[in-house]
């Protein structure tokens, strides 16, 4: 398996979603540090969450999909607010998406354990696992390491940051 090791990012508040009742959500822990000159560094316990586009959205209490191929299913919800009220978003097994953490390292496997392309997109949550962690970047620096040493030829190992 080829892996990209990243320290990742996220910003903005999350929209309300109903958690699914079929697959529990267990967010991998990913501690990060904030540092200030003369004050040292402080560890913040954050958690990783997989983008909702990689998840199963289905009618609350049922199995009918709310989203098909990235498009809302008109039979289950006609407007976005109806989908938010009537659809559940299932949890995921992070290892099956090639996502793992170890200490302050986040590993995203480009190919999942079954050999399919994973290319997961993840965000950071606050320790409460309910709110995205928001980086406050004014007059600050953001650093991370990306290990692309094991990527095969022709593979893009970029890290995209949106602040």
Image (spheres, rainbow, N blue to C red):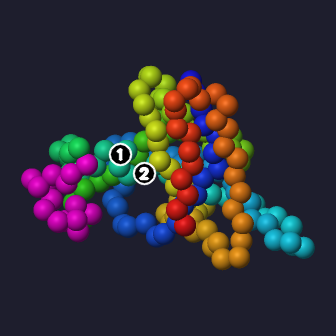
Residue 96 lies, in percent from the top left, at: 47, 32
Mark 1, other Cα within 10 Å: few <14 / some 14–19 / many ≥20: few
Is residue 54 found left or right of 5 in the rendered image?
Answer: left
Quadrant including the N terminus = top right
Image: 135 above or below 61: below
Residue 158 lies, in percent from the top left, at: 56, 45
Quadrant including the C terminus = bottom right
Identify the residue under disc 1. Answer: 55
Say what secondary structure mark 1 lies in: loop
Identify the residue under disc 2. Answer: 51
> Contact, CB < 8 Å: mark 2 with mark 1?
yes
Q: Nearer the viewer, residue 45 or 115?
A: 115
Q: Nearer the viewer, residue 133 or 71?
A: 71
Mark 2, other Cα within 10 Å: few <14 / some 14–19 / many ≥20: few
Query: Magenta stretch: residue 38 in it?
Result: no
Q: Using the numbered discs, state the Cα–Cα distance from disc 2 to disc 1 in whole angstroms.
A: 7 Å
Q: Residue furthest right?
A: 38
- Name which residue lies at 43% across and 51% down: 51
- Name which residue lies at 61% across and 68% down: 135
Quadrant location of residue 107? top right
Residue 1 visible at all:
yes
Is residue 149 found left or right of 51 in the rendered image?
Answer: right
Q: Which residues are magenta?
A: 70-84
- Name which residue lies at 64% across and 72% down: 137
């Amino acid at each position: 398996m080829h892996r990209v090791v990243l320290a990742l990012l996220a910003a903005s508040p999350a929209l309300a979603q109903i958690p699914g009742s079929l697959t529990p959500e267990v967010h991998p822990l990913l501690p990060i540090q904030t540092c200030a000159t003369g004050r040292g560094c402080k560890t913040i316990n954050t958690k990783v969450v997989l983008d909702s586009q990689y998840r199963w959205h289905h009618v609350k209490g049922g199995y009918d999909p709310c989203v098909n191929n990235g498009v809302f299913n008109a039979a289950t919800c006609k407007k976005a607010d109806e989908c938010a009220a009537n659809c559940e978003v299932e949890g995921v097994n992070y290892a099956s998406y090639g996502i793992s953490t170890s200490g302050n390292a986040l590993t995203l496997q480009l190919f999942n354990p079954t050999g399919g392309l994973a290319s997961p997109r993840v965000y950071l949550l606050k320790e409460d696992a309910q709110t995205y962690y928001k980086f406050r970047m004014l007059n600050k620096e953001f650093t991370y390491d990306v290990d692309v040493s094991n990527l095969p030829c022709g593979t893009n190992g970029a890290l995209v940051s949106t602040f």
